[in-house]
Image: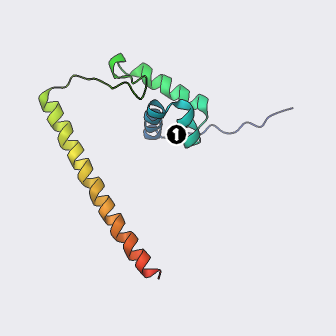
Amino acid sequence: MSRKNKPARRYAEEYIKEAVRLAQSLGTPEAAERLGVPYATLGGWRRRSEAKEPPELVNLSAQQPITVKLSASELEAENLRLRKELADARLDLEILGKATAYFAKRSR
């Protein structure tokens, strides 16, 4: 009995990185199910990702915090980046809220 081979799926590098982060926080089986990606594929991505990272950056479980020594200037730069990202997210939420109200009002 022959099995038809499906063409190999290609995933964007950013998608793979985010999938690995999700697998590290939720666990590989749960993340694979949520993303609809085969368990073995996600497991391979995770192993390759962890092999590339220095050992101190690998998060082995969701409960284990990642500790990295950063200089004060690096922390300030990261803090500034995160504040900008938060401001963008808040603006996105505000716009979505207004759009939702507008379209809810129009549909009545």
Residue 7 lies left or right of residue 71; in this view the side is right
- Residue at coordinates 48% horizontally, 40% vertically from top-left? 12
How was the colour assigned to the protein in this rendering? rainbow
| Residue extending farthest front | 63
The secondary element bearing badge 1 is classed as: loop
Q: Please tell me how crowded label 1 is: few (under 14), some (14-19), or many (20+) other residues with Cα within 10 Å.
A: few
Residue 31 lies left or right of residue 4; in this view the side is left
Q: Is residue 1 above or below residue 52?
A: below
Q: Is residue 65 above or below residue 12?
A: above
- Residue at coordinates 46% horizontally, 32% vertically from top-left? 20
Between 105 and 17, the one nearer to me in the picture: 105
Q: Is residue 90 above or below residue 5?
A: below
Location of mark 1 (residue)? 11
**Quadrant, the N terminus:** top right
| Residue extending farthest top | 55
* Residue 70 position within the rendered picture, expressed as x and y whole percent measured from the top left: 19, 25
* Residue 102 position within the rendered picture, expressed as x and y whole percent measured from the top left: 38, 76
| Residue extending farthest right | 1
Q: Is residue 70 above or below residue 4?
A: above
Residue 10 lies left or right of residue 96; in this view the side is right
- Residue at coordinates 33% horizontally, 26% vertically from top-left? 65
Instruction: Identify the image quadrant of residue 2.
Output: top right
Task: Please state which amino acid type lies under the numbered disc 1.
Answer: Tyr
* Residue 19 position within the rendered picture, expressed as x and y whole percent measured from the top left: 48, 37
